[in-house]
Image (cartoon, rainbow, N blue to C red):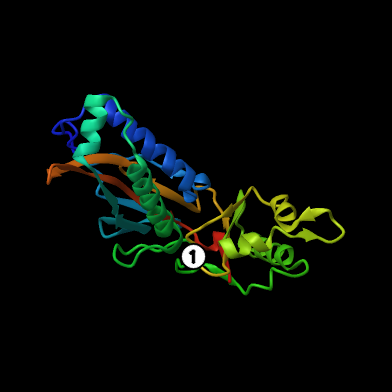
């Protein structure tokens, strides 16, 4: 079954290749969460729900029945973003050989990419998912003034110790809001290095996350036993309809962040 309805559209393969290329390029420039989270999938378009286990998952036996304790099942939500290509632009491209302007495609891919990162970092109440910043049980650290002294470095040391004290080991990344990222660009006196450079020497990655609000940072141990990103259908473009002679399309994906151990997260704010 062609759930993307491309076979029902009037467009040839070369047209769809151009659309897919524009979507992939814009998404690759925008997405942050996928740069450090392990990917579970793609699981396919028919995947409606997924499960994930806590570290204390076990089978419990009683009176001839067995259940799995520590396992959670969730619906794999769909994200979407629509766009329209005007019939006159398409005619100009097909009949006169003029290049087709795919700016609206790139803008829509950027918009759904931001939705994905918002889901990863903040979750979504409507679909019933928690994010990295608000999952139940995440550790919290009160932030210092990152615009002065060695405060960013000191806060990071504290956050690393908080994670290690919980027995969490593995690759660490730090995600910061844009306001904090700019605070990290100042030269630390006596070192000849920016705060960002000093911090980067202690972790596996430093990410400026545009969807993070205010002055907020989060330190994560991103090994797959602690968290990952489940994907059913990766970002794909479908054909919707022709209306008023113009053609409508929808970019879709089905994804969910799986936070398996909140002790691997320290929110600094």
Residue plotted at (43% across, 62% down): 131
Q: From this viewpoint, is residue 59 visible?
A: yes
**Camera-nearest residue between 180 and 158:** 180
Q: Taking 194 as reference, is 49 left or right?
A: left
Q: Residues within 10 Å of mark 1 (few under 14, many from 20)?
A: many
Name the quarter where the N terminus is drawn. Answer: top left
Relative to 135, say whether 120 is above or below: above
**Camera-nearest residue between 134 and 101:** 101
Residue plotted at (77% across, 66% down): 150
Q: Quadrant of residue 181?
A: bottom right
Disc tally is: 1
User: At numbered mark 1, what does the secondary structure look like: helix, strand or loop?
Assistant: loop
Place of residue 189 in the rendered image (x, y in percent of width and height, measured from the top left) = 84, 61
Residue plotted at (59% across, 65% down): 179
Relative to 203, say whether 218 is above or below: below
Q: From this viewpoint, is residue 68 visible?
A: no
Residue plotted at (69% across, 68% down): 146
Q: Residue furthest right?
A: 190
Q: Quadrant of residue 191?
A: bottom right
Name the quarter where the C terminus is drawn. Answer: bottom right
The residue that mark 1 highlights is 133
Q: Quadrant of residue 114?
A: bottom left
Q: Taking 174 as reference, is 81 left or right?
A: left
Q: Taking 40 as reference, is 194 left or right?
A: right
């Amino acid at each position: 079954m062609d759930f993307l309805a491309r076979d029902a559209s009037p467009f040839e393969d070369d047209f769809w290749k151009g659309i897919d290329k524009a979507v992939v390029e814009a998404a690759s420039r925008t997405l942050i969460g996928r740069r450090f989270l392990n990917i579970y999938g793609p699981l396919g378009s028919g995947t409606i729900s997924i499960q994930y286990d806590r570290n204390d998952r076990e089978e419990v036996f009683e009176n001839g029945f067995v259940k799995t304790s520590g396992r959670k099942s969730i619906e794999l939500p769909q994200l979407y973003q629509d766009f329209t290509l005007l019939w006159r632009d398409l005619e100009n491209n097909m009949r006169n050989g003029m290049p087709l302007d795919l700016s609206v495609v790139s803008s829509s891919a950027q918009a759904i990419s931001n939705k994905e990162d918002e889901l990863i970092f903040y979750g979504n109440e409507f679909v019933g998912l928690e994010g990295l910043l608000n999952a139940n049980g995440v550790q919290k650290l009160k932030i210092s003034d990152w615009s002065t002294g060695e405060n960013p470095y000191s806060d990071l040391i504290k956050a690393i110790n908080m994670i290690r004290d919980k027995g969490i080991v593995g690759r660490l990344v730090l995600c910061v809001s844009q306001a904090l990222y700019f605070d990290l660009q100042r030269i630390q006196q006596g070192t000849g290095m920016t705060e960002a450079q000093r911090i980067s020497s202690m972790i596996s990655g430093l990410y400026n996350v545009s969807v993070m609000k205010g002055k907020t940072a989060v330190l994560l141990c991103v090994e797959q036993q602690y968290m990952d990103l489940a994907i059913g259908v990766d970002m794909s473009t479908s054909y919707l309809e022709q209306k008023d002679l113009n053609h409508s399309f929808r970019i879709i994906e089905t994804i969910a962040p799986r936070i398996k151990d909140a002790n691997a997260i320290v929110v600094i704010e």
